[in-house]
Amino acid sequence: MMNALPNPLASFRLDGRTALVTGARREIGRAIALGFAAQGARVAVHHLGNAEETSDADAVVAQMRAGGAEAQAFAADFATETGAQDLAAAVLAAFGQVDILVINASIELVEPWAGISRAHFDRQIAVNLRSTLDLFQALVPPMQARGWGRVLTIGSVQQNLPHPGMLIYAGSKAMQHSWAVNLARQCGADGVTVNNLAPGAIATARNREQLATSGHELLPRIPVGRFGRPDDLVGPALLLCSDAGSYINGASLLVDGGRLIG
């Protein structure tokens, strides 16, 4: 009798792993969180904490639990001084450890660079960068101590093609990518991979107005001929956050339909 063929999909399973996905109440974060839950992970769903986000996050958690997954919602405002630190402490208290960290939450304030106020600068830096560092510092060292971990920053095509009206946002995504490369070099030997996933023009609520006004100009520059969907990020995220991607470290994977080369 012939031996059974190996299952190449088995290494994508996340059974026994705990994942924290920031900004997971809708769109890209929600799609990734649901994908992880479907692969066996227990998932911490982060949201800002206002009424709308709480309702959305509770719905995501309910969907996961209905599918047999373990999940819990956690509220934290990254614009506050200790928001990310408080989130890390709450998730650790509830789940004991975090094996997979997906940095998805961010804000973009569109305005001409010459008019950027200190308040708008500080808010974007706090949410997009300071919280990232706080989560790294709280959650990556325990991953190193255990000998297994996955860190994924959700970047943007703007780290390569900065929008003139998003000086701070685009710059923060470029810095996040730099941090991912830096940590990848330092943590890889400890079994912790750190990668960046860079979406292109994804049809989300955040981008809806821009795509409605300028999408006809952008679409011809996307070789696959369509805008992305949040679920286009799920497969790449699973690859980079599972054993299937254990030899991928310090990479920045574009999910942009070929826009950067188009």
Image (spheres, rainbow, N blue to C red):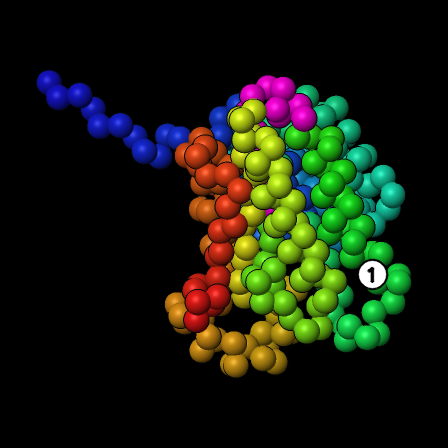
Residue 5, position as x, y percentages in the image:
22, 28
Q: How far across and down, in percent of the image, does residue 141 sit?
A: 67, 26
Residue at mark 1 = 121
Residue at (85, 39) in percent of width and height: 82
The answer to whether residue 259 is above or below residue 62 is below
Which residue is found at the position 48% from the left and 62% from the top? Answer: 256
In the image, is residue 149 part of the stretch drawn in magenta? yes
| Quadrant of the rendering where the C terminus is positioned | bottom left
**240 relative to 72 in the view: left or right:** left
**Residue 228 drawn in magenta:** no
Q: Residue 45: x, y in percent? A: 66, 40
Question: 183 or 128: nearer the eye?
Answer: 183
Amino acid type, residue under disc 1 in the picture: Phe
* Res. 97 in view: no
Segment colored magenta? 141-153
Seen at 58% across and 43% down, the residue is 181
Q: Nearer the viewer, residue 243 or 176?
A: 176
Q: Quadrant of residue 187?
A: top right
258 relative to 10, above or below: below
**Numbered disc 1: secondary structure:** helix
Q: Nearer the viewer, residue 176 or 95?
A: 176
Quarter containing the N terminus: top left
Dot 1: few (<14), some (14–19), or many (≥20) neighbours within 10 Å? some
